[in-house]
Image: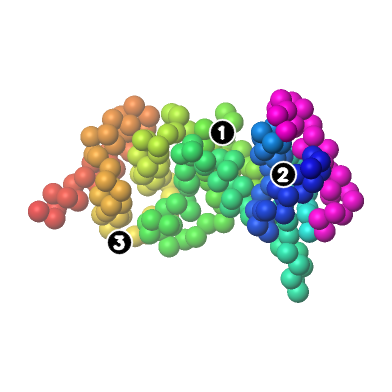
Amino acid sequence: MTYMDFVKQIILSKQEGEPIYIEDIANELSKQFNLDLKKSSAAASVATKRILEKNEIPNLRFFQKGIYYRCTKTPFGETDIDKQRLISDKYLAYHSGYESGDRFLYLLGLTSQLPNAVYLVSNYARDCTRYDEKLEVYTCPPKTEVNEDNKLYLQILDALSMFDKSPIDAERPYKIIDDYIRENHLQYDKLLYYADRFYSKKTVLHLAHSAGQRESLL
């Protein structure tokens, strides 16, 4: 089997719309043909480019450097790459990020206004908030490195930090926050630890109001 045949097999094994990464193909080539990664990366790039140029897989499309996908033709045109999967792979994989901003407030039920903009906090974001034009999302650097243990804590504290500048119109916003904290088994002492280290005094106060919801239910 040639490199080209092997790469074609990998591409054809992918679902339509699923991102196809040259890096992943190179890793498979490396294992199959016992190549070092530099050589397998070059081989993967050349093979995929030739397959595209020769139309050997008619529905193969180029998205951006290192990323391809297979489309489906419909009466309304060709389907696009799965951008949600791309966003997850690039910014959120392995608990490296989370959604924030007004859209997250909407998803929580804190506001009835659905914004168009999507904000993601990610370890892979650069030093300030930037717009990823290809994926149509804003990316923001985290207050501290995001991991599996602290992700939900930072996410809900981000929401509390927005209470004074976002259109909160829920009837009982602090109860919504407390419900989220309980449902996700978060601990108030850990929330206070992160709030005190990385957020403003106003955020700490909003956290206190949320904790007070439990007292009001007793």
Q: Position of residue 105 (x, y in %)?
A: 42, 53
| Tag 1: amino acid | Tyr
Pointer 3 or 1: first along the chain: 1
Q: Which residue is mark 2?
A: 67
52 or 147, which lies in front? Answer: 52
Tag in front: 2 or 3 = 2
CA distance separating discs 1 and 2: 18 Å
Secondary structure of the residue carrying numbered label 1:
loop
Tag in front: 3 or 1 = 1
38 left or right of 158?
right
- For residue 171, the mark is 3
Tag in front: 1 or 2 = 2
| Tag 3: amino acid | Glu
Pointer 1 or 2: first along the chain: 2
Q: Which residues are magenta?
A: 33-58
79 left or right of 123?
right
Q: Which residue is mark 1?
A: 124
In the rendered image, the vertical position of residue 197 relative to residue 179, given as above or below: above
Name, please, the residue furthest toward the bottom. 75
Name, please, the residue furthest toward the left. 218
Pointer 2 or 3: first along the chain: 2
- For residue 185, the mark is none
Residue that appears at 67% across and 53% down? 13
Q: Position of residue 195 (x, y in %)?
A: 32, 33
| Tag 2: amino acid | Ile
Secondary structure of the residue carrying numbered label 2:
strand
Q: Position of residue 33 (x, y in %)?
A: 73, 33
